Amino acid sequence: MKAELLLTVALLSLSGMGAAQAQIANPPLSAPPVAVEGLGGPYPVVMEMDPSLADHTIYRPADMAAVGHPLPLVAHGAGACLNVGNMTPQFLGELASYGYLVVTGGPIIEGADAPMTPGTPGGLDRFAQNRTAQLLETIDWAVAQNDVTGGRFEGRIAADKIAVIGHSCGGLQAIAAADDPRVTTAIIGNSGIIRTPPADDTRTGRSYRPAGVDDLKRIHTPILYVSGGPTDQAQPNAILDFQAIEGVPVFHADIGTGHGGTYREPRGGDYAGVMKDWLNWQLLGGTAASRTFVGADCRLCTDDRWTVERKNID
């Protein structure tokens, strides 16, 4: 109960819900490609906004043809369900640099990738809330764009290889979106179902708790949880989710980062490395990537920094 209350308070404080907000006025509807520097994958990456997908930011290989195969899609929900597309460009760009089309909810906003905390001038409170529906809008858009004759994404998107991922509140959005039959896999970072809201909470709906326990029953794909150790207030929820999910491969990787993870570190830190391997295994069938998770001597199993649990995975 205490951990769930702390998580709820964290989600609410980050999103600015219940308080007056001075949000960004007239966010951009489009933005030209800008290079994301210093990434680890084989493909240079650009970040952009496309007017055909309002209120989203795209990370993709600068030369999509160079990848040599259609790009699997990664639909992302940001921490605190913030509607901003460039909060963690190193993390999202790192995934894209391995040949993925990564799309997150929200526009590109100047300075959004700078260190911020709730309540500081020009901090997190200026950002609007995004919606679970934006992950599904991303999937709809990608499937449609892949078939647009003469369009720049024609034939470039692997519409049958789709991941939904998210951090904290965005992880709950990913859980909610994961029941879409088009989804191939899900990755949940520093998140898990909030089973007991605060006793004095009178709100209804799924705005700050986008997913519930019933959503776990609808998980139909392999799913990875990554938690930040005992100081991550969402860790207990991830453990309960792991125990509750049945009938699909589930892997829970836990490392002592706290709730913030490593999303803002260069190349997205350890989280990006693990999540990239999961994507390469689940969406591209990568044998080398699978060794991070499979076998008694899997890479995470033998790395003392990580605590792992898994089921329906050999």
Image (tube, rainbow, N blue to C red):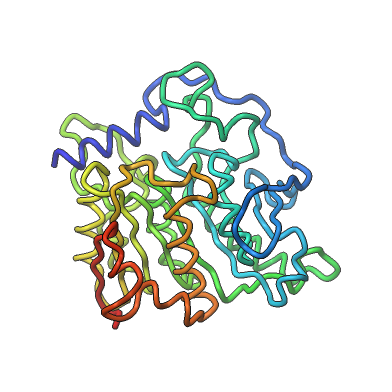
What residue sits 27% from the left and 46% below the top? 234
Left or right, 84 with respect to 119, comes to right
Nearer to the camera, 186 or 285: 285
What residue sits 37% from the left and 24% below the top? 18
Image height check: is 13 above or below 90?
A: above
Left or right, 71 with respect to 174, comes to right
Query: To which quarter of the image does residue 257 belong?
Result: top left
Nearer to the camera, 186 or 228: 228
Q: Position of residue 208 (x, y in %)?
A: 36, 40
Residue furthest out toward the top? 121
Q: Position of residue 204 (x, y in %)?
A: 31, 39
For the C terminus, give its image quadrant: bottom left
What residue sits 49% from the left and 36% below the top? 129
Nearer to the camera, 34 or 246: 34
Residue furthest out toward the right? 150
Q: Position of residue 227 (x, y in %)?
A: 31, 53
Count of numbered badges drawn on the protein: 0
What residue sits 61% from the left and 53% below the top? 39
Image height check: is 237 above or below 203?
A: below
For the N terminus, give its image quadrant: top left
Image height check: is 20 above or below 254?
A: above
